[in-house]
Image (spheres, grey):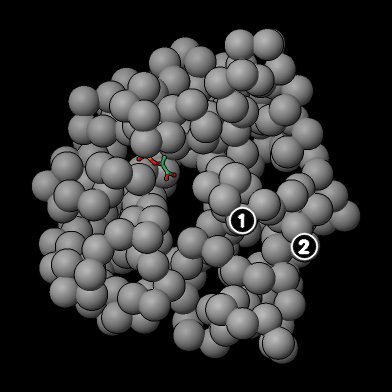
Amino acid sequence: MKIIAGNWKMNLTFDQANTLANSIKSSNKNEIILFPPSIYALKVKEIVKGKNIKVGVQNIFYEDFGAYTGEISAIMVKSMDLDYVLIGHSERRKYFFESDEIINKKLKKAIEYNLDVILCVGETLEERENNKAFEVVKNQVLRAIEGLNNLNNVKIAYEPVWAIGTGINATPEQANEMHQFIKEIINIPVLYGGSVNEKNAYELLSQEFIDGLLIGGASLKAEIFNKIIEIAELL
Ligand code: PEP
């Protein structure tokens, strides 16, 4: 089984989100997950009902309730019967200063409430150029899962920062190598993310250690995302 996830980030009006959600194909073979902006998540869940498509949010805070204006919590997500949460996306690390410690707290909360999680890790260009990619990713993984022994609900997305939204994807070999490395640390599904499109999806998905794709830009266009869903059906 492959996992095809779409991260809509902070994009689309409500009407556009409804149109997109209505157009997404489902699969009986693979797992399809949508991460709309959280304010649209319940509506998207309603739209895809009965279609074997899961819906999640792009972030949670690590407390249940309280004076944390603007935040949403794992218990809230669970109480709305949503399935998934993305944790530690590089944009959260960069723009919202999420440290490995914060990511670890969020992961613990998501697991406490039995949410499925995609934990994002990945090195910057500078780190790769300085031969630090493997060390950085290893540290991100180990720090995120510190103190946790049940990771049944967790998947990792390897998303090299230099490949996100740049049009430059990691080569299938580069991604496969890192996925194998991650699976040696912890043997759970590992998705690749970073400039995935309908042209590179087949080769990426064909790699031995690539269990799925986390797709940003290309998940905003129904025909492209559906094409990638169709490609995954071939494997
Ligand atoms: C992402 O946001 O997780 C991502 C991989 O984006 P893009 O596919 O646009 O590079």
- Horizontal side of 105 relative to 16 (left or right) equals right
Rendered location of residue 206, percent (x, y): 36, 24
**Residue at figure coordinates x 67%, y 52% from the top left:** 97
Q: Which residue is mark 2?
A: 105
Characterize the local packing of mark 1: few (<14), some (14-19) or many (20 or more) Cα atoms within 10 angstroms: few
CA separation, marks 2 and 1?
A: 15 Å
Residue in front for this viewpoint, 208 or 47: 47
Give the secondary structure at mark 1: loop
Q: Which of 70 and 72 lies nearest the eye of the viewer?
A: 70
- The image position of residue 190, as x and y in percent, is 55, 38
State the residue at coordinates (87%, 55%): 147
2 or 1: tag closer to the N-terminus: 1
Say which residue label 1 marks: 96
User: In the visual, does 17 lie left or right of 138?
Assistant: left
User: Given the current orientation, which residue lies at the most extreme right position?
Assistant: 147
Query: Helix or strand or loop: what does disc 2 sit on?
Result: helix
Residue 177 visible: yes
In the rendered structure, which amino acid carries the disc numbered 2?
A: Lys
Q: Residue at x 32, y 21 (%)?
A: 203
Ligand 1, by image quadrant, is top left
Comparing labels 2 and 1, the label whose residue is closer to the camera: 1
Residue 2 visible at all: no
